[in-house]
Amino acid sequence: MQVFIAGATGATGRLLAQALLARGHSLKLVVRDKSRLPEAVRTSPKVSIHEAVLLDLDHDALQSDVAGCGAIVSCLGHNLSWRGVFGPPYQLVHEATRRLYSAAEHSPTRTKFILMSSTGVRNRRAHEQVSLAQSLVIGLLTVALPPHRDNERAAAYLQNKVGPQSASPEWVIVRPDGLTDEAEPTPYSLHPSPTRSAIFDAGKTSRINVATFMAELIEQEPLWEQWRGQMPVIYNQAY
Ligand SMILES: NC(=O)c1ccc[n+]([C@@H]2O[C@H](COP(=O)([O-])OP(=O)(O)OC[C@H]3O[C@@H](n4cnc5c(N)ncnc54)[C@H](OP(=O)(O)O)[C@@H]3O)[C@@H](O)[C@H]2O)c1
């Protein structure tokens, strides 16, 4: 399958790109700086790279970038610098989600859309309950930290504007807890909602497990059908 990845230079996106190539897929990438890609990805004949700022691309350019892709994945996130967290684009993840989804909307072939989010983002359709203390902290983060607000809006776009039953593209929002780096995939567990507090009792999720789960969502039909239109939470099993 041909897969489009946004954020392939990031810590999780590059693992997903490598995992998909190892599984025989071909990739289309939009990256700001291709030198930030792992060499094996940058030089693979199965990878087509468009070097550009994703939010600078118009609808036609994005449509051409996602054309022919059976899956679109966003691993975008704000860089952890003062400018990345507090500077523009404040709506990086939300805008990219909205524009990529719209670019694929009239694709003649079935498309899976996967958004990397976080356990701090609540599934409001599932009426997820959190403690008053957590609710206050998340409320503060939403006001004080543009990236959290951005992740909330990106998830709300798919949940409310698009809706869980959408067939074109279908979508899954993947919610890891505290991200860690590990060399190899390890056993992980999946849950419809968080089983621990994202603020006061955060678990851990390795980026390589996130990449593995995303690759399996793309490849495995029963797994996709199980989570389609939902916001699965992923934890490493050791925690
Ligand atoms: N940190 C955690 O514990 C945690 C937990 C759960 C979920 N999350 C979420 O997981 C997601 C990914 O995390 P990660 O650590 O894998 O991300 P990351 O390493 O920070 O990668 C971010 C990606 O987004 C791209 N990007 C940043 N600003 C951009 C812009 N203005 N225009 C275009 N591309 C831009 C980066 O491109 P460049 O390489 O060009 O900078 C990079 O490819 C984030 O949304 C984060 O909120 C994080």
Image: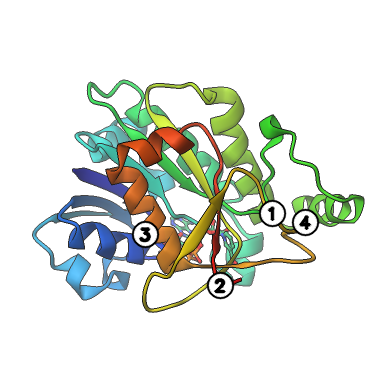
Q: Is mark 1 within 8 Å of ligand 1?
A: no
Instruction: Say which of marks 4 and 3 sits in front.
Output: 3
Residue in the picture at 61% in, 48% down: 151
Q: Which numbered disc, 2 or 1, marks the residue that appears first in the sequence?
A: 1
Determine which residue is flagged by label 3: 212
What's the CA distance linking mark 2 and mark 1? 14 Å
User: How many labels sit on residues?
Assistant: 4
What's the CA distance linking mark 4 and mark 3? 29 Å
Decide: is 17 above or below 168: below
Instruction: Say which of marks 1 and 4 sits in front.
Output: 1
Query: How many neighbours does mark 2 have within 10 angstroms: few (below 14), some (14-19), or many (20 or more)?
Result: few
What's the CA distance linking mark 1 and mark 3? 21 Å
Decide: is 163 above or below 201: above
What's the CA distance linking mark 3 and mark 2? 16 Å
Determine which residue is flagged by label 1: 195
Which disc is residue 79 wearing?
none
Q: Which numbered disc, 1 or 4, marks the residue that appears first in the sequence?
A: 4
Q: Give the amino acid at mark 3.
A: Thr
Determine which residue is flagged by label 2: 238
Q: Secondary structure at mark 4?
A: helix
Q: Nearer the viewer, residue 183 or 192?
A: 192
Q: Give the amino acid at mark 4.
A: Leu
